[in-house]
Image (cartoon, helix red, strand yellow):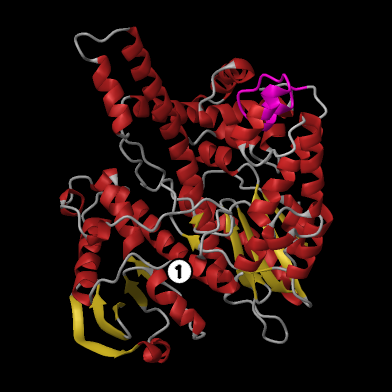
């Protein structure tokens, strides 16, 4: 039985919904404060239906209430609305509605966002929620196999991901502010007055100014810095690291060191610490399905980019451990399974796929293997990558055929799909304009060149979309099954492990030390189950690196 919930100010309206008979029973209304108690009265297998987990679930978590399963209508709407398999359905062809409203913007990590002022895109009443649920269920029910089964799995996994994202936001990553402060002082020096440059950065700034004979230079300003470098006889076009490293001048070494420290100070300095770490936890704002391929995003704190310099501050609490696991070379393994390429799957049997290619005699060195595989998935054809790709094509024609076919479709402006059916967007107006320009009667070589370039650019996107998106589906299934397994684990004192971090192909569980080994085995079992859910009995191995540590930097 499903139970639909809608939030109306401080009141909640609810009604039962039966998959075969539709709405069942009377609409109930009660206060938001009473919701946890009402949920506790429901059977364990009740599936909750709501517009957006980010709207209601955080309130439940703060009240100590968790739900095992739910339908996140906003997340599943985006999947079904765009799914190529459902392109002729009434849902796909309907006019835009409130369900198509764009999400809140996803800010760049470390850009100074304010976590506590973000909010869902807006509430919808119970009638709209029930109507949308019925549309989605009808769309899924009328799809032919195997699309129906695959999209059902994707929608379920996406909705569970919506729950997990809010649970991660609620839990936070165990983090020692005192340790991070010591790290910052060791690397940057003492904090500057009024948020100014820390002492070590200021000393480096003075060295750069002296070497360039520019006493008022602001090294944080690219315009000022380029001007000062040119006055010193250095013909630079940018302040990018790779270009500066080519220069021979006394200012370059301190400048490069200054820029490295400035990045740390800006992204993860004391302002970041004060904003995103509280009560011993780093608290980002995870957004399930925030990227077009299905990968997660975040709205602040830089959770997607925790640099190595600060990972030692991610520390387990006393009596607890961090169980950190990452899937080795996830995307090429997914590609082998998608293509049912048994030869490539054989090379995947082990922790290091790249070494597997060397052992199979396809490529001479591990570094060459890495270059070739990344080129195959991202569309690089120049230099060493271009010379190595034909070897992969000869050894693994099925796998290479999948990405090449996706690339050609993208060049033609067609949409492609992941293994479970998430569909790529159509190319933007820039692509349309470039192709139209090449078709004009007076078009010349420049217009044709621009059209070909636009096609190749979009082909690289679709080439990677099918692989990255399917890897995101595998990771969602891994995460969802792990969540289920963790719910049954307790130590001798009844303490339970908690998921605290997820990044594409990596998870972190904060576990009581006494059951950390059991958690590690649950992580491995969940990975095996994710492979079975997506690819059945195809013999692909998703190798995991699993470490039980007291701080994050020891995991790698």
In the rendered structure, the answer to whether residue 453 lies left or right of residue 330 reads left
Q: Position of residue 22 (x, y in %)?
A: 19, 74
Determine whether the residue tagged by mark 1 lies in a helix, strand or loop.
helix
Residue indicated by mark 1: 117
Residue placed most toward the observer, 480 or 385? 385
Magenta span contains residue 86: no
Q: Residue at point 41% right, 23% down? A: 456
Residue 390 visible in rendering: yes
Q: Residue at point 53% right, 42% down? A: 334
Magenta span contains residue 233: yes
* Magenta span main SS: loop
Query: What crowding class fits label 1: few (fewer than 14 Cα within 10 Å), some (14-19), or many (20 or more)?
Result: few
Q: Position of residue 201 (x, y in %)?
A: 77, 48
Image: magenta residue range: 228-247
Residue 239 visible in rendering: no
User: In terms of image quadrants, where is residue 506?
Assistant: bottom right
Residue 521's place in the image compared with 228, above or below, is below
Residue placed most toward the observer, 527 or 513? 513
In the rendered structure, the answer to whether residue 187 lies left or right of residue 471 reads right
In the rendered structure, the answer to whether residue 468 lies left or right of residue 309 reads left
Q: Residue at point 45% right, 29% down? A: 460
- Give the total of numbered labels: 1
Q: Residue at point 20% right, 70% down? A: 128
Residue 196's place in the image compared with 511, above or below, is above
Q: Position of residue 176 (x, y in %)?
A: 74, 69
Residue 55's place in the image compared with 139, above or below, is below
Q: Position of residue 518 (x, y in %)?
A: 70, 69
Locate the N terminus by quadrant.
Answer: bottom left
């Amino acid at each position: 039985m499903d139970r639909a919930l809608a939030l109306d100010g401080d009141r909640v309206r609810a009604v039962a919904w039966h998959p075969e008979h539709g709405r069942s029973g009377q609409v109930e209304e009660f206060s938001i404060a009473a919701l946890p108690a009402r949920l506790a009265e429901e059977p364990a297998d009740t599936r909750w239906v709501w517009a957006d987990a980010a709207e209601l679930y955080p309130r439940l978590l703060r009240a100590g209430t968790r739900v095992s399963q739910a339908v996140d209508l906003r997340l599943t709407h985006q999947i079904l609305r765009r799914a190529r398999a459902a392109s002729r359905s009434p849902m796909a062809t309907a006019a835009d509605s409130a369900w198509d409203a764009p999400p809140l913007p996803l800010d760049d990590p470390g850009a100074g966002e304010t976590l506590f002022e973000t909010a869902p895109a807006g509430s919808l009443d119970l009638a709209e929620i029930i109507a949308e649920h019925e549309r989605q269920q009808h769309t899924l029910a009328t799809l032919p196999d195997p699309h129906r089964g695959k999209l059902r799995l994707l929608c379920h996994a996406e909705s569970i991901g919506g729950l997990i994202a809010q649970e991660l936001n609620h839990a936070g990553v165990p983090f020692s502010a005192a340790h991070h402060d010591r790290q910052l002082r060791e690397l940057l020096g003492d904090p500057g007055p009024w948020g100014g440059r820390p002492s070590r950065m200021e000393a480096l700034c003075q060295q750069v100014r002296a070497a360039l004979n520019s006493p008022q230079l602001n090294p944080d300003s690219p315009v000022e810095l380029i001007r000062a470098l040119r006055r010193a006889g250095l013909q630079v076009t940018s302040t990018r690291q790779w270009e500066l490293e080519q220069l021979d001048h006394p200012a370059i070494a301190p400048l490069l060191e200054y820029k490295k420290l400035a990045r740390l100070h800006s992204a993860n300095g004391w302002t970041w610490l004060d904003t995103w770490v509280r009560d011993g936890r780093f608290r980002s704002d995870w957004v399930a399905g925030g990227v077009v391929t299905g990968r997660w995003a975040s709205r602040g704190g830089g959770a997607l980019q925790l640099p190595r310099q600060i990972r030692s501050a991610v520390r387990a609490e006393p009596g607890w451990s961090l169980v950190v696991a990452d899937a080795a070379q996830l995307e090429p393994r997914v590609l082998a399974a998608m293509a049912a390429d048994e030869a490539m799957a054989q090379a995947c049997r082990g922790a290091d796929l790249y070494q597997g290619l060397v052992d199979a005699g396809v490529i001479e060195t591990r570094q060459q293997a890495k270059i070739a595989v990344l080129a195959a998935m991202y569309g690089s054809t120049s230099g060493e990558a271009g010379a190595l790709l034909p070897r992969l094509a000869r050894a693994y024609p099925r796998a290479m055929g999948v990405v090449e076919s996706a690339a050609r479709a993208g060049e033609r402006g067609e949409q492609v799909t992941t293994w479970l059916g998430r569909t790529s967007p159509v190319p933007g107006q820039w692509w349309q304009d470039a192709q139209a320009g090449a078709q004009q009667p007076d078009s010349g070589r420049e217009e044709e060149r621009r059209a070909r370039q636009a096609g190749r650019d979009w082909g690289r996107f679709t080439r990677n979309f099918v692989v990255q998106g399917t890897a995101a589906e595998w990771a969602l299934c891994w995460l969802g099954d792990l969540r289920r397994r963790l719910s049954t684990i307790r130590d001798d004192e009844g303490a339970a492990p908690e998921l605290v971090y997820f990044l594409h192909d990596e998870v972190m569980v904060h576990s009581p030390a006494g059951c950390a080994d059991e958690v590690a085995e649950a992580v491995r079992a969940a990975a095996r189950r994710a492979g079975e859910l997506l690819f059945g009995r195809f013999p692909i191995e998703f190798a995991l690196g699993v470490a039980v540590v007291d701080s994050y930097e020891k995991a790698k």
